[in-house]
Image (tube, rainbow, N blue to C red):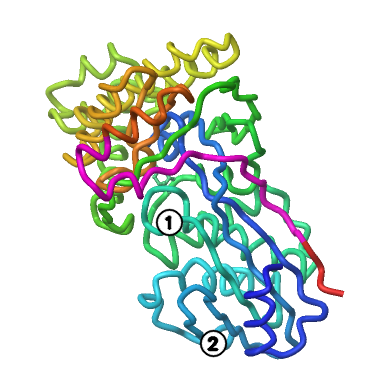
Amino acid sequence: MTVRAAKLFAEHFGDPTGAVVARAPGRVNLIGDHTDYNDGFVLPMIIDRHVEMVVRRRLDQQVRIVAADDRERVDNTLGEPIDYSNPSWLPYVLGVAHELAERGRISSGVDLVFRGTVPQGAGLGSSAALEVATALALDAVFNLWLNPIELAELCRDVEHRYAGVHCGIMDQLASRLGRPGHALFIDCRSLEARHLPLPFEGHRVVIIDSGIRRRLADEAYNARRAECEEAVSILRKVEPSLNALRDAYPALLMSCERRLFTDRLGRGWHVVTENQRVLEACESLARGDLPAFGRLMNASHTSLREDYEVSHPALDRLVETAGEVDGVLGARLTGAGFGGCIVSLVKEAAMPALEDRLRELSKDLSNRVIAVGTAEGAGITEVVA
Ligand code: GLA
């Protein structure tokens, strides 16, 4: 536990003896966006930015939360209604406690202090890191024995219910299960997850933040998901066995072109081709073929821009600029899009050239470059004796 968190805990709630400290990392998605809620494939990896949370069980129904970074405090009683619109972290932290209480898994409250280093709203899984850290901490103090999938599903449900974002399972599973030095391949239908070693020696995964924030809760994300559901119901008239866009294929999409209209055709096309790219990306990792991996990243960006229409001119400019630098193998927007970050795979030796090129584009851009270092996976890091 950091000194700051310990001091704040003592200041607000007294002696932390008996508290547990939980940690959950953010993630960057290497390839496979907007496929998770279409039962498809994704390939995220955890990053060296995380949420840390100190939690101690209470005997009454109170939940008292302190956000160390903003010095905000919210007190609530389990079961009592609360306005979740403010502060921005509230649905992800208090939502987990309320959901567990409603499911009859916990019957008393907690004192909780958290802090984090995952940039918020940047498409790096900050809300999932908050949810997963909270769920892990509550799991430990109440002896719930939630398995990783149950825990990730609970966190996803919290996001739907308390934040109104109809997200898929990728971020929560990645944060819960991700391991250093590995990407996590997830089949979002079966929830089978495999850790794939990253053969990135001599290379860096580089995230560049556009600085543009568009809350995920924005209608746009939910609208994309609704369009996919509409596309499924249209395609089902021709192919009744189809359950999700994962089951579609190019010939089927083309045969329904008129009924789908351009936008839903594009959504379906992206999902079908992106799933294929994720599988090819896994194969290229296994072969150690990084140029092929980079080309798949580039193709993914084009598809997200043209067919899924979730890019932003600032993201396109960053992808283009990175692509001009010799030694950048590939770049794409990552996460939900509409703003946030791009991710790129860069030869170590090309890092200075990339930074120079970004500086030419905009002076403060170099401050928004994150070269991903060694991450640490989620877990309980300490029990305060
Ligand atoms: C957000 C959601 C995820 C996923 C991505 C897009 O990060 O939380 O479930 O849909 O967007 O791939």
- The type of residue carrying mark 2 is Asn
Q: What's the residue at 16%, 39% (across, down)?
A: 313
- The type of residue carrying mark 1 is Pro
Is residue 207 rendered to the left or right of residue 25?
A: left
- Residue 52 tag number: none
Is residue 11 rendered to the left or right of residue 220?
A: right
Q: What's the residue at 46%, 31% (across, down)?
A: 30
Report the residue marked by disc 1: 119
Quick one: label 1 or label 2, which is nearer the N terminus? 2
Q: Residues within 10 Å of mark 1 (few under 14, many from 20)?
A: some
Count of labels shown?
A: 2
Q: Does the magenta portion include 16?
A: no
| Residue closest to the eye, 108 or 286 | 286
| View quadrant of ligand 1 | top left
When asked about the image quadrant of residue 60, the answer is bottom right
Is residue 47 rendered to the left or right of residue 309?
A: right
| Residue closest to the eye, 351 or 46 | 351
Rendering coords of residue 226 (x, y %): 28, 45
Give the magenta range: 358-381
- Quarter containing the N terminus: bottom right
Q: What's the residue at 60%, 13% (across, down)?
A: 286
Report the residue marked by disc 2: 76
Q: What's the residue at 52%, 76% (across, down)?
A: 67
Q: Residues within 10 Å of mark 2 (few under 14, many from 20)?
A: some
Nearer mark to the viewer, of 1 and 2: 1
| Residue closest to the eye, 94 or 209 | 209
Residue 197 vs 149, above or below: the answer is above
Rendering coords of residue 52 (x, y %): 62, 63
